Amino acid sequence: MAGTVGAQAFESVEVGQSSRSANPANIDALLDQMTLDEKIGQLVQRMGGRSKALNSRLGPDELEKVRRGEVGSYLHVAGAEPLRELQRVAVEESRLGIPLLFSMDVVHGYRTIFPVPLAMAASWDPDTAVRHARIAATEASAAGLHWTFAPMVDIARDPRWGRIVEGAGEDAFLGSRMAVAQVRGFQGSDLAAADTIIAGAKHFGAYGAAEGGRDYAGAEVGKRTMQEVYLAPFRAAAEADTASYMTAFNAVDGVPTTGNAALLRTMLRDEWGWEGLLLSDWRAVEELMAHGVAGSRSDAARLALEASVDMDMVADVYAADLKAAIDADPALVPLLDQAVRRILETKRTLGLFDDPYKYHDAARESRVILSDDHRAAARTAAQRSIVLLKNEGDVLPLAKDAQHIALIGALADDALSQLGSWRARGMAEDVVTLRAALEAAHPNVTFAPGADSRSDDASGIPAAIAAAQSSDLIVLALGEDFDWSGEARSRSSLELPGRQRELFEALAATGKPLVVVLMGGRPLAIPEIAEKADAVLQTWLLGIEAGPAIVATLFGENNPGGKLPASFPRTTGQVPVNYDFLPSGRPADPDLTKDTARYMDQPITPLYAFGHGLSYTDFAYGEPMLDRSEIAADGGALTISVDVTNSGARGGDEVVQLYMRDPVANVSRPVKQLRGFRRVALAPGETKRVSFTLTADQFALWGPSGGWVIEPGEIELMIGSASDDIRGRTSFTITGRGAGRIAPAAIETRTLVMETGQ
Ligand code: BGC
């Protein structure tokens, strides 16, 4: 029966005597009853299937392992009923009856697929992220799951790295807010509730700093950048009580994270005081050998356990080889006990010892999955994630008259791609494409694929030109299909793939108004589009409601309010081009006769900066107001406020952004760092006052000898509409010295929006 999904796959056998400890009064008592093999069994996560063939490995041999207590958790499994049966085998047919943990990558939706995470970050709206994670948890828990491997909180400053699509982009502050929002959404306020699941913030370390943007490659990151940037969203997730983390595959400064005791045991456990479940990434324990830090599997097991990695995903190194390591070094026994205790505590927190079956209600499963409410929330999220990059001559929004529209581009008709990377149980048939939505909304649409992002086939270009010539305007979908971004999907070029550039040039040459709808999972280098298209909408991969969201935006029922969570370079060679770079002794100067920090062959700025995003209306900013000019390093706080007015004729959202700079410090500080933001909705003519309250520890830096240091002196504050569109500046002074507790980017800024009555 191997390879079958469903209850029939699980044969029931008689077990001699079952001393089920359904509800251990205390975990220590349970630990005392466990044999060494049973303890190691808890540390083992096995695959119940593949991500594209869930449950496919749950055959009789696998069940025997469960009965023998050799498995603590499964991944790539799903379904209320099949998992109830699997759980029953663990609880009723194993000696100690310890329930299993069921897990999956539910990254941007379970069946109701939301925009890819990078797109949701472009909403600059943590509430959107909370709602997505809440809905994903509701659906996943109804399908028998306890645990998701999300949020992915890796900072990514190199868009060549395909996994930039899975995270919140280049900034540690925005990334931290999105991390916290998702942890809260997945975990809710009570992990023992039947509709909450544990979050698995990943991939702990500096996975996003992989050299050259090559997935799995090592990272060289300075201590300060490590603490202030890469680790900040993880710290924020810890503050939000993430119940688990996953370790990164790669090495930082030569030390593979999965065996990095200094980073994991000393910093994460001892200094941060985090006591949750630490899981390795897929075979990452085994890969300690390929990294060249372990000479054998038992060596790898020892290193990972010493680093406090509790659970071994898939590799079976703990299962097969930890015992040998323990025989050789009995000092590992207390470390093993700690790991088992943390796993059992996690199971207890979920309430599995009280009721191991509470996640297995098939009626709830069919009721909640892909419900109308969930679909509606996916559409709202998709609308909020769209970024208007360019809108010359206000070509957008389109008039809803009888204009004939040529809809060009294979991506406009590609349902699967809108699901992005990690689609859990998402299905292409659930997706409403741009083509379907536009044809439903508008009477005169001619569709021609023209070219796609994958093939070298240019044969559709002449028909696309013909369609354009007999239309009034062109809506052109360009970019990358889903398979260009995601794990192991790094690119050496950020240009439009396939023959799309040729298609674009041919259509631009027709002289018809040209609206580009840019799709994909990463920032692309698109200088020709920025120059020649009349309007450009960045629509990422928006999930099942992609088409309706884009069409609502084209016609102005949705006024785009998203902003870029990552800078768009002009060329691939310009990366990394993040906004928060360090000043140089020779700052970039456009004058090429001077020797400064710039390229000779490109302007010094990105094509579109971090935080950029236009609207169909305009926003005017008042002068920033500070409530004081001095704060004490030791516990001081201040509030900065600004009035923002919708000065146009249409309602719209503005993301008010607050940046800081420490102009003179013990170490050189970034030219700008995000410290607050708020997305506000404004009716035409309406003004709202947005206030940010910051505490002194939000201006700390990682000191020369480690630790968070608040230095005395001036701090500059900048408020604006984008990192390159600052509308007002002010400054204040910090008096005295102080110590911070956590990374400043991980600290939430209290934000208030007040109606001004104008
Ligand atoms: C990825 C993780 C993922 C895991 C399980 C790995 O290859 O790096 O992000 O959670 O597989 O699917």
Image: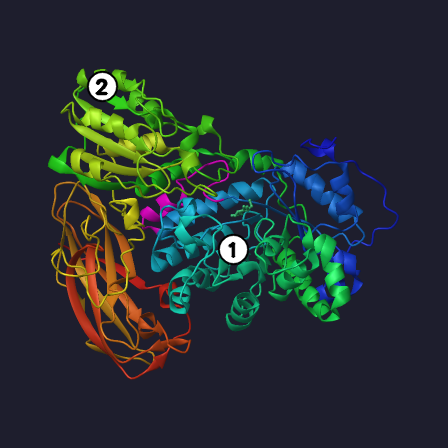
| Label 2 neighbour load within 10 Å: few <14, some 14-19, many 20+ | many
Q: Quadrant of the C terminus?
A: bottom left
Of residues 231 and 120, the one nearer the viewer is 231
CB at disc 2 and ligand 1 closer than 8 Å: no
Q: Which residue is mark 2?
A: 465
x and y percent of residue 270 in the render? 55, 72
Task: Report the magenta residues as a range.
Answer: 107-125
* Position in image of residue 105 (x %, y %): 53, 44
| Residue at x-position 24% and y-position 32% | 516
Q: Within the magenta stretch, is there residue 261?
A: no
Residue at disc 2, secondary structure: helix
Q: Which residue is mark 1?
A: 248
Name the quadrant containing residue 349: bottom right
Q: Nearer the viewer, residue 219 or 665?
A: 219
Q: Main secondary structure of the magenta part?
A: loop
Q: Is residue 488 left or right of residue 461?
A: right
Residue at 48% in and 40% down: 422
Task: Please indicate whether residue 69 sits to the left or right of residue 515 in the image.
Answer: right
Say if 529 sits above or below 126 in the image: above
Relative vertical location of residue 88 with respect to residue 675 in this rendering, above or below: above
In-front residue for pair 650/716: 716
Where is residue 736? Give x, y as percent. 29, 84
Give how far across and how far down residue 114 sits, in percent: 42, 39
At label 2, which amino acid type do we have? Ile
